[in-house]
């Protein structure tokens, strides 16, 4: 039987065998490590593709495809489009093979990925920043291919690229740690999911193979529904490594045969999975690298006592983005909720709320600005490792007769748009508070230093994960004498807090819009 007459999955299996030797010329096998979760759950094994030279699995497919270029094709050079990780793989192979490569990347590609491409490719690589999306970069690269005759190296829709990605599954099989009950495989264009699922199914026919996509970038889910790859109108870019508008034709054909099912995960779930990888393995993952684990964590109870495989497929993330994700609600706990609660605008009402409905909950974010004479609407984001405790908050508020609104995911909360009306303030005083980030420390300060002496007019606090919590708070007094007496007697340090000082006058003026 001619190879072209073989079923696609059989051809792919054959190509993975051929790829085994080729890929080993460009890099070493990556580790397979156990991730232990606290409490009952599945036995999770993580294929650490972040441990390779380019910190992502994409080198496998690029190297395998470029290793079979003829001498004439090498002389013509190669061209590709990539958001970053495939670009690094092409750069690595180009340098080792001595092949010129032009790589088209969106202008929004993370700087860390652009720098890595230059590092791995050196003088053999030319980066062309084009357009604002991967699709626009593809169009430019295809135009280059037509105009200059270079060989296009597809990021996923190529049999040998898929086979190269499949070698990571070959290493899993050869590790001796299998078999596994399930594997959760993230999907962008589908090349890795196709190669890995095809190989795992060959050796462990009973394995459940789950394709995982981001909620705003589920191109394979759309392809399954339509019976063929279709283009999404919009693509969420949080998981930038899997932000592909349309699944590849070849990956689609393989995945619909090999995958048991598809699931989608939220950005918040991905952020939490990134935190779990850090806490369990001290592994820094890019968002797309944690998608498989995010799906496992969602289905944790289903897989108790079972053995599951996930792929940490990449760790190329800008440091700035890592900081934003670390402070996000999704990374903070297994469960989170943001609520806006109505309380009377009078001294002691805020503390009574904290003592009552919010007792025992972790307050990760606290926003409030005085905007009404009679009522206040502080906004709290609460988190907890026990989802039941957070889920019970609405019942607590209802039982206490409190009016409240769920603002989880609200844009104004995310951007910290805290209203404050100066005309409602009598004699305000704004304080910078640094307190020890432990249970009860903030409450102790508010209770011992503030209670009964003033009313809150402003509160801005977000948990950062540091040992010290930092808040900017505003107090309003009935008269100037009370304010000055408070200022004069305020201890700089005290029980539960490290430092508390009034802010500068110019800060006060800006806070009140002057």
Image (spheres, grey):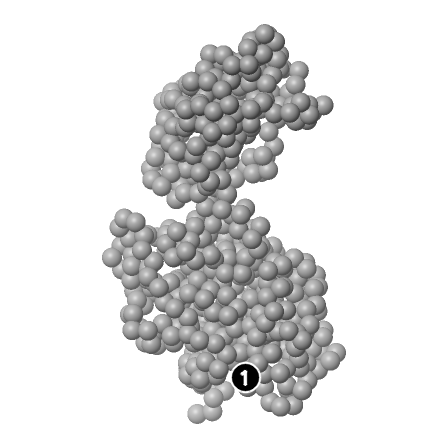
Residue in view at x 50 percent, y 55 percent: 287
211 vs 28, nearest the viewer: 28
Residue drawn where x is 70% and y is 68% of the image? 128
Q: Is residue 269 left or right of residue 303?
A: right
Q: Is residue 293 visible?
A: yes
Q: Quadrant of residue 1?
A: bottom left
Q: Is residue 420 above or below residue 290?
A: above
Tell me which corner region of the image, top left, top right, bottom left or bottom right, holds residue 358: top left
Q: Check the image and name the residue furthest to the right.
A: 147
Residue 348 percent coordinates (x, y)? 46, 15
11 with respect to 156 (left or right): left
In the displayed structure, does residue 270 sit left or right of residue 153? left
Residue 440 drawn above or below residue 65 = above
Q: Position of residue 192 (x, y in %)?
A: 47, 69
Can I make out residue 268 in this image?
no
Name the residue at 46% across, 41% down.
Answer: 465
Q: Residue at x 47, y 73 (%)?
A: 165
For mark 1, give the secondary structure.
helix
Q: Residue furthest left?
A: 305
> Which of the two residues, 108 or 407, is positioned nearer the viewer here?
108
Please say if 257 is above or below 353. Answer: below
Q: Nearer the viewer, residue 432 or 84?
A: 432
Q: Percent x, y for residue 93?
A: 57, 78
Work out which quarter of the rendered image holds the C terminus and state it: top right
Disc 1 crowd rating (10 Å Cα; few below 14, some 14-19, many 20+) is many
Count how many numbered circles sit on residues in the image.
1
- Residue 369 % position (x, y): 58, 24
* Residue holding disc 1: 67
Residue 357's place in the image compared with 464, above or below, is above
């Amino acid at each position: 039987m001619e190879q072209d007459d073989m079923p696609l999955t059989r051809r792919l299996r054959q190509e993975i065998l051929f790829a085994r030797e080729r890929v080993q010329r460009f890099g070493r096998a990556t580790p397979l490590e156990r991730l232990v979760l606290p409490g009952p759950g599945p036995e999770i094994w993580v294929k650490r593709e972040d441990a390779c030279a380019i910190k992502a699995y994409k080198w496998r497919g690029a190297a395998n495809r470029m290793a079979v270029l003829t001498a004439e094709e090498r002389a013509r050079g190669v061209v590709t489009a990539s958001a970053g990780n495939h670009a690094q793989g092409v750069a690595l192979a180009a340098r080792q093979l001595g092949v010129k490569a032009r790589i088209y990347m969106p202008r929004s590609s993370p700087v860390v990925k652009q720098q890595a491409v230059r590092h791995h490719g050196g003088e053999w690589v030319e980066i062309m920043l084009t357009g604002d999306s991967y699709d626009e970069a593809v169009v430019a690269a295809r135009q280059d291919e037509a105009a200059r005759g270079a060989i296009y190296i597809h990021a996923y829709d190529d049999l040998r690229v898929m086979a190269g990605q499949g070698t990571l599954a070959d290493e899993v099989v050869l590790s001796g740690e299998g078999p596994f009950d399930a594997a959760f495989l993230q999907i962008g264009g589908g090349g890795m999911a196709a190669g890995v699922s095809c190989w795992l199914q060959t050796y462990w026919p009973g394995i459940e193979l789950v394709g995982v996509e981001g909620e705003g970038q589920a191109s394979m889910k759309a392809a399954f529904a339509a019976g063929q790859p279709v283009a999404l109108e919009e693509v969420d870019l949080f998981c930038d490594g899997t932000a592909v508008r349309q699944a590849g034709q070849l990956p689609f054909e393989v995945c619909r045969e090999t995958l048991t099912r598809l699931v989608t995960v939220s950005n918040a779930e991905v952020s939490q999975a990134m935190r779990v990888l850090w806490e369990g393995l001290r592994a820094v993952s890019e968002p797309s690298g944690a998608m498989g684990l995010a799906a496992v964590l969602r289905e944790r109870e289903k897989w108790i006592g079972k053995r599951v495989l996930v792929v940490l497929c990449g760790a190329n993330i800008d440091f700035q983005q890592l900081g934003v994700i670390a402070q996000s609600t999704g990374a903070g706990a297994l469960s989170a909720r943001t609520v806006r609660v109505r309380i009377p605008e009078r001294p002691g009402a805020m503390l009574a709320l904290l003592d009552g409905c919010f007792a025992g909950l972790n307050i990760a974010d606290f926003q409030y600005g005085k905007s009404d004479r009679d009522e206040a609407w502080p906004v709290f984001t609460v988190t907890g490792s026990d989802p039941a405790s957070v889920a019970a908050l609405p019942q607590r508020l209802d039982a206490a007769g409190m009016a409240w609104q769920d603002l989880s995911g609200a844009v104004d909360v995310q951007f910290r748009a805290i209203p404050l009306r100066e005309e409602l303030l009598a004699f305000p005083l704004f304080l910078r508070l640094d307190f020890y980030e432990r249970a009860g420390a903030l409450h102790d300060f508010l209770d011992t230093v503030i209670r009964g002496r003033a009313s809150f007019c402003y509160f801005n606090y977000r948990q950062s994960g540091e040992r010290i919590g930092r808040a900017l708070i505003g107090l309003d007094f009935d008269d100037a004498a009370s304010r000055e007496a408070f200022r004069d007697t305020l201890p700089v340090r005290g029980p539960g807090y490290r430092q508390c000082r009034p802010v500068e006058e110019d800060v006060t003026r800006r806070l009140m819009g002057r």
